[in-house]
Amino acid sequence: MAIHKILIVDDSPTERYYLTDILVKNGFSVSTADNGEDALVKMRADRPELILMDVVMPGANGFQVTRSIARDPELAAVPVIICSSKNQETDRIWGMRQGAKDYFVKPVDAGQLLARIAALGA
């Protein structure tokens, strides 16, 4: 199933704009949330086909929200790609163990991100 609807979860307006710009220019429909709690509400309402998740945010962090998504039978089928400034291998491993399908370190490379989205949708 091709991916069209993407939810970006990041507390940085700059990051949200950067990722939205890349995705919209490549034909994706994008919605955004600036924290984990808002993301869970929007997921249930909008049913995105992919989530790009920041880690360091106020309230629930991206690892916690990713784990909540993975454990929720209604949401578990939605893939999560973590996009974080946390660049340690242990962070990547932890993110994957929480249920993420991939882990990118900011600044996210547009070509790599688009290639991964295409692979997930294949």
Image (spheres, rainbow, N blue to C red):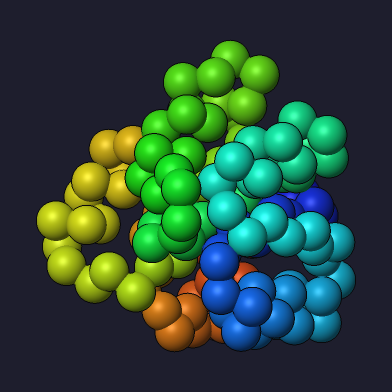
In this rendering, the count of numbered labels is: 0
Q: Nearer the viewer, residue 111 or 70?
A: 70
Query: Which residue sits at x=80%, y=62%?
Result: 30
Q: Position of residue 7 (x, y in %)?
A: 70, 54
Q: Specify the quadrant of the image occupied by residue 4.
A: bottom right
Query: Which residue sits at x=75%, y=30%?
Result: 44
Q: Is residue 12 left or right of residue 43?
A: left
Q: Nearer the viewer, residue 113 or 121?
A: 113
Can residue 52 be seen here?
Answer: no
Q: Is residue 113 left or right of residue 40?
A: left
Task: Specify the farthest residue to the top.
Answer: 73
Q: Position of residue 61 (x, y in %)?
A: 40, 49
Q: Position of residue 65 (x, y in %)?
A: 47, 39
Q: Nearer the viewer, residue 28 or 43?
A: 43
Can residue 79 be seen here?
Answer: yes
Q: Is residue 109 left or right of residue 16?
A: left
Q: Specify the quadrant of the image occupied by residue 66.
A: top left
Q: Quadrant of the N terminus?
A: top right
Task: Specify the farthest residue to the front.
Answer: 59
Q: Nearer the viewer, residue 17 or 28?
A: 17
Q: Is residue 121 above or below residue 103?
A: above
Query: Which residue sits at x=67%, y=45%?
Result: 38
Q: Position of residue 56 (x, y in %)?
A: 38, 61
Query: Which residue sits at x=82%, y=82%?
Result: 25
Q: Specify the quadrant of the image occupied by residue 67.
A: top left
